[in-house]
Image (cartoon, rainbow, N blue to C red):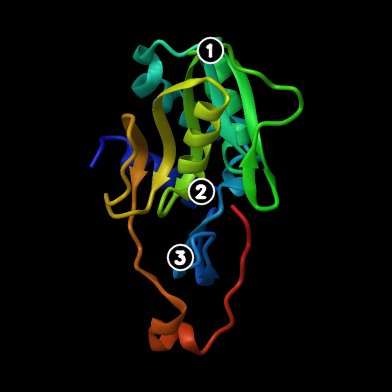
Amino acid sequence: MNPQNDEVIQIFKDSGALLEGHFLLRSGLHSAHFFQCAQVCQYMDKVTRLAEIMVAALRDYGATTVVGPAMGGLVIGQEVARQMSLRFVFLEKVDDRLALRRNFKFTPGEKVLIVEDVITRGGRVLEALEQCRAHGAEPVAVGVIVDRSEGKTRFDVPHHSLAELSFPTYPADDLPPELQNSPATKPGS
């Protein structure tokens, strides 16, 4: 576990961003816990601190651009880019898949960092890596605030998380009794 784990989790708790209940995650899995990063991102002092920690892990990759997948990577990605004095580009959802739009372009071989809020299986990060490469960029590293994959998520570039916190997740057909008796909500990250 990284040394900032406790500090990052405390920021989530102080922001009311660590929720308990029955949640349907973007991955399709169910959980009794949810990281609602939007609650943290209301407070720029907290975003600034999270970005400071992330920048320390990402600064030596030679990137010129930070890419944030919408919605989760927008605020933290932009702040990481600001602190590193890099360009910021975002990918947005089109038919529930990430796409490069708004006339954003990459130069061939442009070195990019992918910055995301929370991963469970890493699906949006994988899409972001694919989109960047499809448009000529070269992803050099990934930074995420919270990795809740129990260390199982792997990418083909270095991956840094500020906090690793794993709560059990369940497929819909294998819910524990405490989740079976309450409806799932999708609060959004």
Residue wearing tag 1: 108
Label 1 and label 2: CA atoms lie apart by 42 Å
The foreground one among 112 and 95 is: 95
52 left or right, relative to 65: left
Identity of the residue drawn at 46% across and 82% down: 179
In percent of width and height, residue 137 lies at 51, 20
In percent of width and height, residue 28 lies at 50, 66
Q: Which mark is residue 33?
A: 3
Element type at mark 2:
helix
Amino acid under disc 1: Pro
In percent of width and height, residue 81 lies at 55, 19
**Of marks 1 and 2, the one in the foreground:** 1
Identity of the residue drawn at 65% across and 38% down: 99
Amino acid under disc 2: Asp
Q: Quadrant of the N terminus?
A: top left
Q: Is residue 178 above or below residue 125?
A: below
Residues at marks 1 and 3 touching, judged by CB atoms closer than 8 Å: no
Residues at marks 1 and 2 touching, judged by CB atoms closer than 8 Å: no
Query: Outermost residue, left direction?
Result: 1
Residue wearing tag 2: 14
Label 1 and label 3: CA atoms lie apart by 41 Å
**Of marks 1 and 3, the one in the foreground:** 1
Compare marks 3 and 2 and give the one earlier in the sequence: 2
Compare marks 1 and 2 and give the one earlier in the sequence: 2
Amino acid under disc 3: His
Residues at marks 3 and 2 touching, judged by CB atoms closer than 8 Å: no
Circle 2 packing at 10 Å, graded few (<14), some (14-19), many (20+), is: few
Label 3 and label 2: CA atoms lie apart by 16 Å
Element type at mark 1:
loop
Compare marks 1 and 3 and give the one earlier in the sequence: 3
